[in-house]
Image (spheres, rainbow, N blue to C red):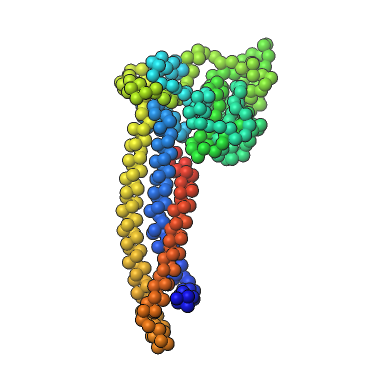
Amino acid sequence: MRALVRYAFRSLGRRPLTAVLLAVSLGIAFGLPGAVRSVVAAFEEELTARADAAPLVFGAAGSRSDLVLHALFFRSDPPGEIRVADRKEFDSHGLAETVPLCVKATVRGVPVVGTDGGYFKLRRLRLDAGDPISRLGDCVLGARAAERLGLKAGEKAATDPENLFGASGGTPVRLRITGVLAAMGSADDDTAFVSLETAWLIAGLGHGHSGGSKTHAHEDRESTSSGYVEVTDENVEGFHFHGRPERFPLTAVIAIPHSRDDRLLLISRYLRTDEGTAVAESDRVLRDLLSVAVRVRRLFDANAVVTTCAMILLCATVVTLSVRLRWPEVQTMHRLGLSRTRIASLFAIEVLIVGLGAFALGLTIVLASHAAAPVIFKWFVV
């Protein structure tokens, strides 16, 4: 048997291109369905996990899918804004714990999420380095965001100047990076977190004075000339906000009902309202998205079955043609005293070697796609 295996390897070595093409073709045919399943499984797992922790999302009336995706992944635009007063009215029912969100800015493309300590508790976020947010202008980065931006605790980064017509005149705010969060394998890794007050400062709802005699116009000119607004330990007391806090904006509010009955009461309360607000059920919205993913997976599975059958038939044809082309070699082996059984075993070993190579390649594709599934999920879904 060892001699047959050794001869099979030598025989394949004389025709390496044919053997490699067969192994690669079969490996892709076997591995691609598993790769698709890994990506879809990551899609389902990520959506389900984040939805379970945030069962309801309160926000502006409009597209519920946009509202849920905005609150869970910070990527899509919300249907509109609500006010702090709307959240207080929602809290007045006493049916759920709430976590406010204000996502209106970016730092070099990384979303800046204004929230409070409740969000860190909800998502079980912990620091890997540095300190938590302690004052206006502080920022904590997710693990991948810190890597992408090349920043660490103690450094600073300015927001992107997108709000050109806001009260801030489009002047970026320079944030102090106080810490970096541990990697969680979720959308939080690609996010910069600030306090709500800092988010409102970025939106242009506040400004600072370094001295009592400084005018608002003087402050605006100074901010513009420096290229950004920066909060420091020396001037933090001089920053203040204009307007009533109840009218400050929020883009969404995550709600965690105390019980199933409380959840149903909240849903019915905001099912039809003329106040411009609505409640979206995260799991229901994401089930609709998952149904699309399941249909895509079934389509790929059906296609994979057809493709695999075609590849097996093609490989059988190639093996048959190979045997016919090698018929003089077969006759020579027969004259040397090899029985038909041993000759058939030789060809079977060659097929087995190619099959094992295809299996190894297919398994590599599946494992690689499983490892890369969260990244693929971020690129193409969120």
Residue 260 drawn at (x, y percent): 34, 25
Q: Residue furthest front?
A: 1
Foreground pick, 375 / 347: 347
Q: Residue at x 39, y 19 (%)?
A: 95
The count of marks equals 0
Q: Residue furthest top?
A: 213
Q: Is residue 148 visible?
A: yes
Residue 134 drawn at (x, y percent): 61, 23
Q: Is residue 267 visible?
A: no
**Quarter of the image containing the N terminus?**
bottom left
Q: Residue at x 64, y 24 (%)?
A: 230
Instruction: Give the answer, above or below, for where 182 lies relative to 232.
Output: below
**Quarter of the image containing the C terminus?**
top left
Left or right: where 124 falls relative to 78: right
Q: Residue at x 42, y 72 (%)?
A: 349
Left or right: where 322 falls relative to 224: left
Left or right: where 274 falls relative to 238: left
Q: Residue at x 44, y 71 (%)?
A: 18
Foreground pick, 252 / 52: 52
Residue 280 drawn at (x, y percent): 36, 27
Residue 48 drawn at (x, y percent): 40, 36
